[in-house]
Image (tube, rainbow, N blue to C red):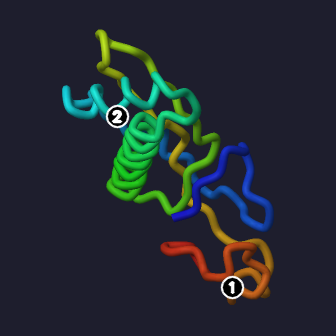
Amino acid sequence: MLVVTTNELEGYRIVRHLGLVRGLTVRSRSVVGNLGAAIQIFFGGNITVYTKLAEQTRQEAFNLLIAHAQEMGANAVIGMRYDANEIAAAVTEVLAYGTAVVVEPIGPDMAAGGGNPWGQSVPGAQR
């Protein structure tokens, strides 16, 4: 599955737009985690407890986005973005969203994976 933040995929032709896809997760930190973060805040610097939570939450939203796109029959997502909102104190929603598409390589060298910037053929691409 190719996922890009651009609206086009160099070396590929979009043959079908399948629509909006999203991955949504809502997370909070445990009381113990908040205590650990409070200690880190006291000393300053990177709050690794929250950094780890943010990374895990974004990864979960991204994985849900991929699953949604695959369910729709896509082999790529274009225009991918993240959005985050605080729902309540210490409760955050993270949304990954984009447009599910079906792409195919342009030209015979791309179909073989030779010109693919990701070094492999695109799953589900028409050849």
User: Which of 51 and 116 lies nearest the eye of the viewer?
Assistant: 51
In primary-sequence order, the first of circles 1 and 2 is 2
The answer to whether residue 65 is above or below residue 22 is below
Left or right: 70 as drawn, with respect to 111: left
Q: CA distance from mark 1 to mark 2?
A: 32 Å
In this view, the residue farthest toward the top is 88
**Could you say where residue 8 lies in the image, as x and y percent from the top left?**
74, 50
**Could you say where residue 120 lies in the image, as x and y percent from the top left?**
62, 82
Q: Residue at x 50, y 28 (%)?
A: 43
Q: Quadrant of residue 22?
A: top left
Q: Quadrant of residue 27?
A: top left
Task: Provide the residue designation for mark 1.
Answer: 113
Q: Confirm or deny contact between disc 1 and disc 2 (CB under 8 A).
A: no
Label 2, residues with CA under 10 Å away: few <14, some 14-19, many ≥20: many
User: Which of 11 and 96 lies nearest the eye of the viewer?
Assistant: 96
Left or right: 26 as drawn, with respect to 48: left
**Could you say where residue 66 lies in the image, as x and y percent from the top left?**
42, 54
**Could you say where residue 17 lies in the image, as x and y percent from the top left?**
56, 46
Amino acid of disc 2: Leu
Task: Provide the residue designation for mark 2.
Answer: 24
